[in-house]
Amino acid sequence: MIEALNFLLDNIYVRFGDKVYRQVVGIPMGTNCAPLIADLFLYCYESQFMTKLSKDPSLLYLVDTFNNTYRYLDDIFSLNNPEFSKYTSEIYPKELTLTKSNINSSSCPFLDLDISISNGKLHTKIYDKRDDFSFPIVNFRFLDGDVPLAPSYGVYISQLVRYARVCSDVIDFNERNQCITGKLLCQGFRYHKLLKSLLNSFIDTKFD
């Protein structure tokens, strides 16, 4: 397995135009194994650090503190852990650069969540980095193409379900609903069919 992994990391080639380049830094993005390799790589360093803490009686209090720090692949969410930034250089290798994404201690984006603390409680809503782009992003299909209608309208319902699970406040849900509805209408969707899909989904959910 080690030989196979070494071969994979040392033989990554990318073709651009009429030239072929060999990747010498990082892991192969887009391959099936890339997320697993990244996860195992970071886990090894994190596991060594936590083992070190557990063996030092004077640092045992940090174990519970770091239990509130979570990672999904290369995204880290540290909740109520003021010690995290102090120990990052001891956890991860110097070749790995950590970039802080939150601008204050009461709110931060994590994956597709916008997390904030309001009145002592966690408040969540949808975070989409594409909203910050200065140009429009096409992330839903147009109906003037050769695509089945039923799955296309099903995307609308699936997104509403995601919004409902993420948003703590109905105001944030309504804002996202208006945004996706307006976008889909501009891409050839019909209002009465969107409404029908929503009502059918609501009835099915209610009786299920």
Image: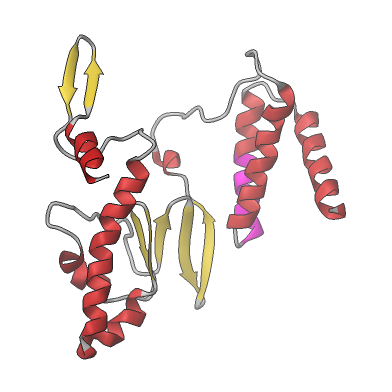
Question: In this picture, is 151 found above or below 16?
Answer: below
Q: How many marks?
A: 0
Out of 116 and 66, give the one closest to the viewer. 66
Residue at the image position 62 percent from the left and 24 percent from the top: 186
Is 190 on the left or on the right of 97, as rendered?
Answer: right
Is 18 on the left or on the right of 143, as rendered?
Answer: left
Magenta segment, principal secondary structure?
helix
* Snapshot quadrant of residue 192: top right
Residue 176 among magenta residues: yes
Residue at the image position 63 percent from the left and 33 percent from the top: 182
Coloring scheme used: secondary structure
Residue 148 in the image: x percent, y percent?
70, 20
Out of 141 and 52, give the one closest to the viewer. 52
Tell me the magenta residue range: 169-179
Identify the residue at the far top of this view: 18
Question: In this picture, is 124 found above or below 174?
Answer: below
Residue at the image position 62 percent from the left and 23 percent from the top: 187
* Snapshot quadrant of residue 87: bottom left
Out of 160 and 134, give the one closest to the viewer. 160
Question: In this picture, is 6 found above or below 54?
Answer: above
Residue 140 in the image: x percent, y percent?
57, 29
